[in-house]
Amino acid sequence: MREQIKLSFSPDLSLNAEGKHVRDGLSTAMFIGDNLWLSCDERTTIERLTRLPDGSFGKHHSFDVHDYLDLPAQDKSEIDIEGMGMADHYLWLVGSHSLKRKKPKRPDSIKKQIKRLAKITSDPNRYLLARIPILQDPATGEYTLYKEVEDPDRTGKILRAGQLRGDKTSNVLTELMEQDEHIAPFMNIPGKDNGFDIEGLAIHGSRIFIGLRGPVLRGWAMVLEVEPEEDETGILHLKQLTKEKPYRKHFLNLRGKGIRELRIFGNDMYLLAGPTMDLDGVIAIYRWRDAVNGHTEQVVHNNELERLCEVPHGTGENTGKDKAEGLAILDDQRMLVVFDSPTDARTVGEHDVQADVLRIVE
């Protein structure tokens, strides 16, 4: 029997404008100190839970990203946050940057259902790569977000929220991808159709690794590497990493799987990988040894990756449920996995949900 940990959410903070509960759309997870940071893919908020004496997580606090950043759409349009990381007193977050295809609705006429499948939409807030200052309160141990705050390590240095330059249809990253020889053909394809779709973020110093759920090229997944830098106005730009471009591409043979989450522990990178398209399929955790020690583009063959374990997913009557989306490292032997669209067996009461704890053995 697998180990599970209960995540408890506040009734007052858990429902979005459409009435969807935060526990039903968990998309990323990050563990720092005694805080578990989470996001739901249909909100503009970041959730903080605190570890309780019994090992579960509760004391839910919600932070609205609108309070810290200038989002392209000032309404409650979703960011579709798919990755979070932390370094140098900044919490980084990334939106999916993906397009959406409308779903057919069974009560509609055949003609209308077919028409919906032809409609592709874009949410402006999805085009977000940003950082928000985060500091730990020495009295409570809780981590808190700030729009602007003094750096505790450097007197007179101000930490301030910032984001990659962009508008309602793109940002610097997508503009670059539209010119990339591997990715450009997929930029106008919705994420769930193997189009461009970000679903992972990991930080190592000034280096940011971005995991792509799609596109997957003949079984090979991609990780992008960038190094943002701030100008005098607080806008983030991408540092030139090679003679040709301000990013690196790393190719990993995950045998058809796309990346759902990235995490770095020591010098190794852990990858949560699963189907790029909207289907049930094997989801597994891989380890890429010494991933952060390379400073050139990498091509990592399947036998150079360690396949650590499989993660449960919905099948049969639970098809389309228990989709593993978030991976948080608890310690050197345990990882916590959170799920989008949890099964009834995973939900507890009206506001709680069970996350899985997987043991990684050397």
Image (cartoon, rainbow, N blue to C red):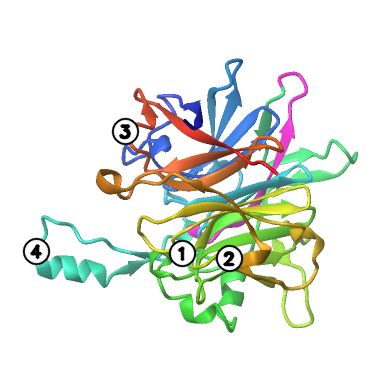
Left or right of 297? Residue 4 is: left
Pointer 3 residue: 344
Tell which circle, 1 or 4, labels the residue nearer the N-terminal end: 1
Please tell me how crowded label 1 is: few (under 14), some (14-19), or many (20+) other residues with Cα within 10 Å: many
3D distance between C-alphas at marks 4 and 2: 39 Å
Tell which circle, 2 or 1, labels the residue nearer the N-terminal end: 1
Q: Residue at x 80, y 53 (%)?
A: 205
- Counting from the top left corner in percent of width and height, residue 13 is at 44, 29
Q: Magenta residues, as a range?
A: 126-140
Tell which circle, 4 or 2, labels the residue nearer the N-terminal end: 4
Q: Nearer the viewer, residue 275 or 44?
A: 275
- For label 3, the SS is loop
3D distance between C-alphas at marks 2 and 3: 40 Å
Left or right of 46? Residue 301 is: right
Up the image or down, 140 lies above or below 330; here it is above
Up the image or down, 239 lies above or below 10; here it is below
Pointer 2 residue: 166
- Counting from the top left corner in percent of width and height, residue 340 is at 42, 44
Q: Nearer the viewer, mark 2 or mark 3?
A: 3
Q: Which mark is residue 98?
A: 1
- Counting from the top left corner in percent of width and height, residue 256 is at 48, 68
Quick check: can you spot residue 233? no
Most distant residue in the right direction: 155
Quick check: can you spot residue 116? yes
Please tell me how crowded label 2 is: few (under 14), some (14-19), or many (20+) other residues with Cα within 10 Å: many
- For label 1, the SS is loop
Pointer 4 residue: 109
Residue 179, image quadrant: bottom right
Left or right of 77? Residue 177 is: right
State yes or no: residue 14 in magenta.
Answer: no
Q: In the image, what residue type sits under mark 4?
A: Ser
- For label 2, the SS is loop
